[in-house]
Image (tube, rainbow, N blue to C red):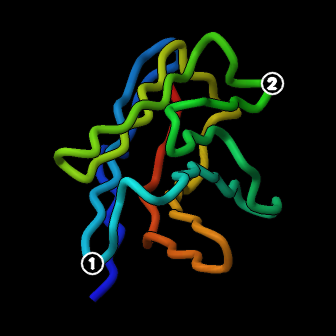
């Protein structure tokens, strides 16, 4: 059974940090690109960061220099380290795994940045 499970979300003050994790099972993790998306209330889901099977990364402009994505294929984990968090980073964060036309999604984890 394919599963992606996000964790690490929570409430943090502006300027703080969180590390999100995405744990994968049920498929060959190392064969898949992994993306982090987020969706804020009333907004469309947007791509935040991705890491492909060669460890090449991409970041959305608003998170460049603040977020870092990394993967551990031995543990079937992807991390999103988020530093210098801003209120506008508040959203539900989702990971997904993509390979050709195979796409899997997690259930999401809430990140709230507020004082």
Q: For residue 11, what is the image quadrant?
A: top left
Q: For residue 102, what is the image quadrant?
A: bottom right
Q: Residues within 10 Å of mark 1 (few under 14, many from 20)?
A: few
Is 75 situated left or right of 93 in this image? left
Please give the name of the residue rendered at 52% of the width and 52% of the height, measured from the top-left corner. 34
Is 32 situated left or right of 29 in this image? right
Provide the residue designation for mark 2.
61
Q: In the rendered structure, which disc, 2 or 1, sits on the residue that comes first in sequence?
A: 1
Q: Nearer the viewer, mark 2 or mark 1?
A: 1
Please give the name of the residue rendered at 28% of the width and 48% of the height, measured from the top-left corner. 77
Most extreme residue toward the bottom is: 1
Q: CA distance from mark 2 to mark 1?
A: 32 Å
Vertical relation: 104 (above or below) 11: below
Please give the name of the residue rendered at 43% of the width and 16% of the height, measured from the top-left corner. 16
Residue 50 locus on image (x, y percent): 61, 42
Vertical relation: 9 (above or below) 66: below
Between residue 8 and residue 27, name the one nearer to us. Answer: 27
Quarter of the rendering occupied by the N terminus: bottom left
Provide the residue designation for mark 1.
26
Q: Residues within 10 Å of mark 2 (few under 14, many from 20)?
A: few
Tag 2's secondary structure?
Answer: helix
Between residue 92 and residue 104, name the one nearer to us. Answer: 104
């Amino acid at each position: 059974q394919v599963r992606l499970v996000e964790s690490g979300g929570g409430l943090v003050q502006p300027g703080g940090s969180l590390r999100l994790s995405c744990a994968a099972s049920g498929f060959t993790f190392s064969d898949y690109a992994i993306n982090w998306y987020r969706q804020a209330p009333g907004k469309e889901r947007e791509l935040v960061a991705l890491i492909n099977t060669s460890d090449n990364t991409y970041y959305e402009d608003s998170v460049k220099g603040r977020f870092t994505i990394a993967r551990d294929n031995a543990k079937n984990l992807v991390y999103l380290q988020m530093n210098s968090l801003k209120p506008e980073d508040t959203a539900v964060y989702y990971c997904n795994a993509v390979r050709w036309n195979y796409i899997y999604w997690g259930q999401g984890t809430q990140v709230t940045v507020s004082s």
